[in-house]
Image (spheres, grey):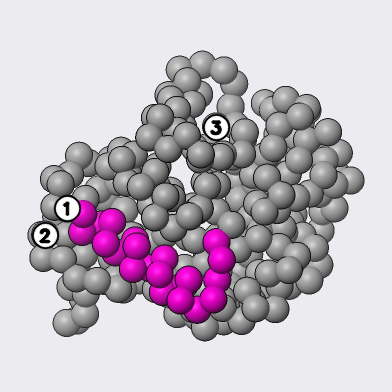
């Protein structure tokens, strides 16, 4: 039987997002979530952790694409990772995800990510795993940084590359990413499969199966976000019954 982790991204993004994540926790529609350190309702995310960490997993949602950074780097401002808006420094979307960066720029990014992680940990959170906003941890320049970050934070589990697809070149490239990460830190553990909730649901409904029977599959969802159809499916579907699987969290991986 397959094992499925349903992870709600963006915990801490806003009060609305946090309230929808909490509803999904209480209805047992998700088994995991990941916390952002630099968004509007960080305190609400910590409350959710304190109230629900005994039965779902809480990970680190690193963020270099939205909100305000917790550190400052003139080089990242010059490169466009940061921008100034009405006198305030903010993170600038996701235009440089695949760029090769200088050593000093990579160090500045690492410093920002590490500062975010420590802010959450200093609030008493013990991370189950690491993922990122807008898939930033999958960027080329993160390949040497991610294994180092896992070692420094004492976290072994990481979201895989989106790989729910037929065998072929694209899947091979995405498999190579995980191998490159593991080459630098052999203790890192990935779920076998990573895919967004709605796409998996739609494939399953059509009888399209890209996973093996004993795979561990992570399904990503965004309660309270812009994906209203996805949330409707999530909140009205018994995962274990629908997908003939066992629902687990990252602590059980």
> Which picture quadrant has residue 125?
bottom right
Stretch of the chain drawn in magenta: 107-127
Answer with the quarter of the image where residue 233 lies.
bottom right
Characterize the local packing of mark 2: few (<14), some (14-19) or many (20 or more) Cα atoms within 10 angstroms. some
Percent x, y for residue 228? 64, 61
Q: Position of residue 253 (x, y in %)?
A: 68, 45
- Tag of residue 75: 2
Crowding at mark 1 (Cα within 10 Å: few <14, some 14-19, many 20+): some
- From mark 3 to mark 2, how far is it between C-alphas? 33 Å
**Element assignment for label 1:** helix
Q: Pointers 2 and 1 in contact (CB under 8 A)?
A: yes
The outermost residue toward the right is 241
User: Which of 218/238 is in front?
Assistant: 218
Secondary structure state at the residue bearing disc 3 = loop
Give percent across and percent down for residue 198.
66, 47
The label shown at residue 229 is: none
Q: Which mark is residue 105?
A: 1
| Residue at the image point whose x is 21% and y is 54% from the top | 107
Query: Which disc, if any, is residue 163?
Result: 3
Viewer-closest of 226 and 83: 83
Q: CA distance from mark 2 to mark 1?
A: 6 Å
Q: Judge whether residue 19 can be spotted in this image.
A: no
Residue at the far top in the pictured view: 168
Say if 132 sits above or below 119 in the image: above
- Could you tell which of marks 3 and 2 lies nearer the N-terminus? 2
Counting residues from the start of the chain, the first of labels 3 and 1 encountered is: 1
Residue 218 in picture, x, y percent from top left: 64, 44
Residue 62 falls left or right of residue 244: left
The residue at 81%/58% (across/down) is: 236
- Cα distance in 3D space between marks 3 and 1: 29 Å
Does label 2 or label 1 sit earlier along the sequence? 2
């Amino acid at each position: 039987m397959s094992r499925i982790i349903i992870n709600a991204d963006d915990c801490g993004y806003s009060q609305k997002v946090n309230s929808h994540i909490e509803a999904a926790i209480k209805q047992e529609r998700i088994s995991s979530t990941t916390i952002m350190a630099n968004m509007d309702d960080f305190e609400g995310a910590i409350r959710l952790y304190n109230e629900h960490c005994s039965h779902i997993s809480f990970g680190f949602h690193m963020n270099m694409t939205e909100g305000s950074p917790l550190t400052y780097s003139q080089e990242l401002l010059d490169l466009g990772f940061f921008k100034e808006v009405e006198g305030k420094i903010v993170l600038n979307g996701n235009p440089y995800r695949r760029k090769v960066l200088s050593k000093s720029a990579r160090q500045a990014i690492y410093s920002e990510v590490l500062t975010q992680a420590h802010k959450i940990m200093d609030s008493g959170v013990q991370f189950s795993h690491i993922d990122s906003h807008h898939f930033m941890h999958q960027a080329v320049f993160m390949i040497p940084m991610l294994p180092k970050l896992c070692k420094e934070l004492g976290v072994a589990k990481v979201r895989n590359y989106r790989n729910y697809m037929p065998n072929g070149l694209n899947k091979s490239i995405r498999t190579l990413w995980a191998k490159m990460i593991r080459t630098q830190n052999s203790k890192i553990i990935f779920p076998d499969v990573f895919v967004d909730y709605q796409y998996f649901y739609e494939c399953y409904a059509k009888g399209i199966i890209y996973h093996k029977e004993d795979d561990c599959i992570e399904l990503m969802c965004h309660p309270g976000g812009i994906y209203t159809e996805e949330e409707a499916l999530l909140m009205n579907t018994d995962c274990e019954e629908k997908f003939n699987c066992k629902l687990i969290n990252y602590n059980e991986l």
